[in-house]
Amino acid sequence: MEENVIIERVRELTSRLLSEAGVELVELTYRRESGGMVLRFAVDKAGGITIGECGSLNRRIGAVLDETHPMDEHYMLEVQ
């Protein structure tokens, strides 16, 4: 599946979760890096976002993606 199709599907799957968390999605990328495929969410909110909040979002987003399997290959999920 093309990377831009995957990005749009992931955006659809996670937009409600991010909105409910009061978080703005600044950038979403899915690309091959030295260690393999990386799905990276760049997020922000009024007053900034903490590392703990990024970790919580990572777990919640990961759970959604584990249920829906929008990608066929192994990937690393990053929320920053």
Image: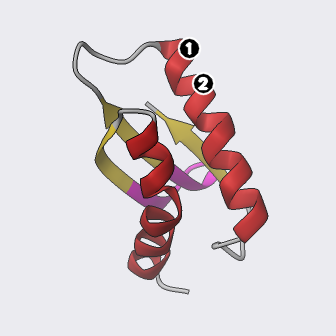
Foreground of the two, 63 or 28: 63
Q: Is residue 8 shown in magenta?
A: no
What percent of the width, then of the height, locates residue 61? 61, 46
Q: Which three-letter amino acid code belongs to the residue tagged 2?
A: Gly
Q: Residue at x 50, y 14 (%)?
A: 51
Determine the residue positioned at 43% across, 63% down: 11
Residue found 38% across the figure and 44% down from its top: 19
Question: Pointers 1 and 2 in contact (CB under 8 A)?
Answer: yes
Q: Which disc number belongs to residue 55?
A: 2
Please rate how many residues cluster around mark 2, counting C-alpha atoms within 10 Å: few if below 14, some from 14 to 19, many from 20: some
Main SS of the magenta part reads strand
Above or below, comparing residue 32 to residue 18 in the picture = below
Look at mark 1 in the image and give the residue it sits on.
52
Locate the N terminus by quadrant. Answer: bottom right
**Circle 1 SS class:** helix
Question: 61 or 75, which is in the foreground?
Answer: 61
The picture places residue 13, in percent across and down from the top left corner, at: 53, 64
Place residue 48 in its image quadrant: top left
> CA gap, disc 1 to disc 2?
5 Å
Residue 56 falls left or right of residue 74:
left
In this rendering, position of residue 37 left or right of residue 5: right
In the depicted structure, whether residue 67 falls above or below residue 57: below
Quadrant occupied by the C terminus: top left
Q: Sort mark 1 into few (<14), some (14-19) or many (20+) by Cα contacts within 10 Å.
A: few
Front residue of 42/73: it is 42
Left or right relative to 6: residue 44: left
Q: Amino acid at mark 1?
A: Gly
Which residue is rendered at x = 46% and y = 61% of the image? Answer: 30
Left/right of residue 24 with respect to residue 41 in the rendered view: left
Magenta segment range?
A: 29-39
